[in-house]
Structures are given as structure tokens and as C-alpha cells.
Amino acid sequence: MYKYEIALSLIKGVGHIKAKNLIAYCGGAEAIFKETKKNLLKIPDIGEYCVKSILNHDVLERADEESEFIKKNNITPIFYLDDAYPKRLKHCDDSPIILYFKGNCDFNVQKVISIVGTRNATDYGKEFCKNLIDELSVHQLLIISGLAYGIDISAHKEALNKNIPTVGVLGHGLDRIYPGVHVQYAKKMLENGGLLTEFISYTKPDRENFPMRNRIIAGLSDAVVVVEAKETGGALITAEIANSYNRDVFALPGRINDEFSFGCNRLIKTNKAALIQSAKDIEYILGWETSPIKSSSVQKQLFIELTSEEEKILNIMKTNGETSIDMLAVLSEMSMSKVSVLLLNLEFKGIVRCLPGKLYKLA
């Protein structure tokens, strides 16, 4: 089960971008391990060290072990070429080539929000988190966070209370839950949401894993909401990555002298996040005030209700053919994040298709 895909993710010196490049040249994960040294060296950006690591088949033995662990624990591996792979994350260049998921949810629903913040959440932050999720519960959405102390677990708990699917992205393997006190919530999340990681079993929750975890939290969502953050920390890393992925970022403002509002206030002050007061701010900026088609599996139909902004995007594509997201943003005079959301909605409706190189064409 996904032996070669797992093995590829374990090769030293081969990151996610190089791995995708290898797959493109060789035609598949298994073919990489059966290719000759001479041919591997012909692939751009693949040097002697990488080739030596590929030809050392120790990773295949570890992949066999992981396959057994996956099967035994009802874990679903999701390869980046699978239909089930999160579409939003797939558009990020450094997305993992394989994910490990345990739970029950659809990552490709039309509305996904990530909520992150300090581990030392105040009553102010927790109350805002509760109210925000209560207001968002009128939408069919998925809520993402990191299962950490503070704001993360507050977001998961409120989502569970409102019967909203919620996924915790982990910085370790699925053989454990960290922190351990959140096991009870993690178990409930498996019924409506789940747990997701790029790390194989027996990977410890080491410090260097969490920035990697944070990029997945950012990449999975339409927008990231930062609820309380110090001047430095994981929540700000997630916000920075979200900006680099052209995701919208929202931040809860606080008093200028509050330690756990420094980060949010700075995000707002430097125009790296929009100030958020309620769910209405998300609905307005992401265009959720309209009533898009609810099902993510809707087939292309003869008559589909489109917003004026969606029609504008389609008219540009009719005129220009295959068009990059950057050009669509320029020609439509809309923000990149806004265009990204519109394209995703149109893709769900079966009207447009995403091509390699972040190009879009009419379906």
C-alpha cells in the first residue's frame, strides 16, 4: 500500500519539490527506484547525493513497516496525485507528496477556515473563538487547527459542539497524540473531521516539525484567522505562510499593551492581515454572502447561478483561453486571494479546470 510513495518521501536530500520533479520525469514513484543511476543523473537538480540516497533501498524497508502500521490502524494515505488530495494544498509548490489521515471528512468542501493562536489563550480570545464559530455554523464548512493548547483546542472544541467537521494537523506521527491531554477531543474528531500529518509513525513532536505542520494548516484553507498571538510564535509563522500562498489572513485586534495581542496588532498594522470583529468580515472578504452551490461534487450543469465576480472571471478566460491566476487578478482588478476563492468555487461547479503551472481553462 503506497510503498514506493512512502519511500520517496523518506529519501534524504529529496524534498517535496524534487520528489514531484522525479515523478514527472520517471512516470511514477515505483519507476524512480527502478531507474538507472545514469538516467537519474540526467534529471535537472538531481545530483550524486540524491541519486545515492535513491539507490540505497533502506527506505523501502521502512516503507514496508509503515504500510503495515497504516493497515493495522485504519489510516488512509493520500498521495498528491490522488483525487482525495486536498485541492487547495495541491496548489502549493511545497505541499507534501503524501499525507496520512485518520478520520472522516472531505478536504475539498467549498469552505475551509483555519483558526490558530497562542497556547496561552485569554478569556477574550476564547470567547471570540466561540462566537466566531457559532456565527460560521450557518455555513457548510471545515475548520482546521493544530490540536495545540490554547486557541487551537478551543477552535476544535467549539467546532465539535456545533457539529462542524474539524481537522487537527499534527507535527508528529499518528502513533500518538500531543499534547496527551487532548486525546479525548482527538477521538471525537475522528467521527466528524479527523487527524492529518505528513509524518510517518514514531516521528516525535520535535520543535522543527511544527513550522512544517503550519504550512499545511495554511495551505488547506481559504483563509487563516489568528486569534491572539505574541510577537513571535507559530501562529505568526502560519500567517506569513498563508500570505505567501495568497490566502486571506484575519487577525483579532487587542489592546496595545496586551502581550498576547502584539502579534495580531502587528499583522494588522503591517497590512498582513485584515482586522476581524465577527464572521461577517470573513463572509464579506471571501464572498460567502452569496449562496454558492452546496455540494462539492456538483457536475457541470446547463444553468448554474453565478455571481457577477465569477462571470467576470469567466469572461476573461473566454477571451484569453488558458490564463494564469496572476493575469486573472490583474485583468479582473481583484486581489489574488479573492480570485483564488472564485476559481476554487468555479472548479467545484465544474466550469473551470486547474492545469499545471497554476493555469486555468474552461472545462
Image (tube, helix red, strand yellow):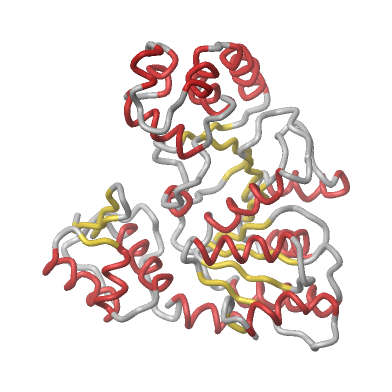
Quadrant of the rendering where the C terminus is positioned = bottom left
Residue 205 visible in the displayed image: yes
Q: Residue at x 64, y 46 (%)?
A: 194
Q: Residue at x 60, y 65 (%)?
A: 240
Residue 70 appears in which quarter of the rendering?
top right
Residue 330 rendering spot, x and y as whole percentages: 29, 75
Residue 160 appears in which quarter of the rendering?
bottom right
Residue 273 appears in which quarter of the rendering?
bottom right
Q: In the picture provided, is 1 more to the left or to the right than 339?
A: right
Q: Residue at x 18, y 58 (%)?
A: 322
Q: Residue at x 73, y 74 (%)?
A: 263
Residue 362 rendering spot, x and y as whole percentages: 19, 58
Residue 139 rendering spot, x and y as whole percentages: 52, 70
| Up-down relation of residue 271 to residue 343 (above or below) | below
Residue 118 rendering spot, x and y as whole percentages: 79, 66
Q: In the picture provided, is 328 more to the left or to the right than 255?
A: left
Q: In the picture provided, is 74 more to the left or to the right than 231?
A: left
| Up-down relation of residue 90 to residue 125 (above or below) | above
